[in-house]
Image (cartoon, rainbow, N blue to C red):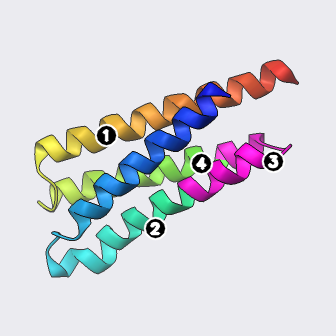
Amino acid sequence: MASEVTALAKAYDLTLWMAERVVRFPKAHHYTIGERMVTTLLDVQELLIEAHYSKEKRELLRRVNLLLERLRLLVRLAKDLHCLSLSQYEFAARGINETGRLVGGWLRQQDRDK
């Protein structure tokens, strides 16, 4: 249960942080990369909430992991296009990795409870 709540909170914090950054992206990248990053994070949030209330959590959590991989690529691209500074990139990468670890722990818990 702790992994669930912590993963939800971490994903929320990362979504809020990213939404605040995307507003400042150059117009050429705001509606492509920026919006896709925020949309991906919102999708992560929705799947985590769904997993929290679902009996079949495994597939939902695997989908979250896939979305986090996509997000890693988008964040790296945003950094390479100079939409994010190096320190912002590092912060986002740490948040994504931490969320991924929490989701992985949640998945392992599901395997143990099986």
- The span from disc 2 to disc 4 (Cα, nearest Å) is 13 Å
Residue appearing at x 57%, y 44% in the figure = 65
* Pointer 1 local density, CA inside 10 Å: few below 14, some 14–19, many at least 20: some
> Looking at the image, do the residues carrying marks 2 and 1 touch, with CB atoms under 8 Å apart?
no
Q: Nearer the viewer, mark 2 or mark 3?
A: 3
**Type of the residue with mark 2:** Thr
Q: Look at the numbered disc 4 and give the secondary structure of its residue.
A: helix
Q: Look at the numbered disc 2 and give the secondary structure of its residue.
A: helix
Q: Residue 68: x, y in percent?
A: 48, 47
What residue does disc 3 label? 54
Q: Residue 66: x, y in percent?
A: 56, 49
Q: Nearer the viewer, mark 1 or mark 3?
A: 3
- The span from disc 2 to disc 3 (Cα, nearest Å) is 22 Å
* 54 to the left or right of 109: right
Q: Look at the numbered disc 1 and give the secondary structure of its residue.
A: helix
Q: Considering only vertical position in the picture, is 10 above or below 14? A: above
What residue does disc 4 label? 64
What residue does disc 2 label? 39
* Quadrant of the rendering where the N terminus is positioned: top right
Numbered badge on residue 43:
none
**Type of the residue with mark 3:** Ser
Residue extent of the magenta highlight: 45-62
- The span from disc 4 to disc 3 (Cα, nearest Å) is 14 Å
Q: Considering only vertical position in the picture, is 114 above or below 16? A: above
Q: Considering only vertical position in the picture, is 7 above or below 75? A: above
Task: Name the N-terminal-most of marks 2 and 4.
Answer: 2
**Type of the residue with mark 4:** Val
What residue does disc 1 label? 93
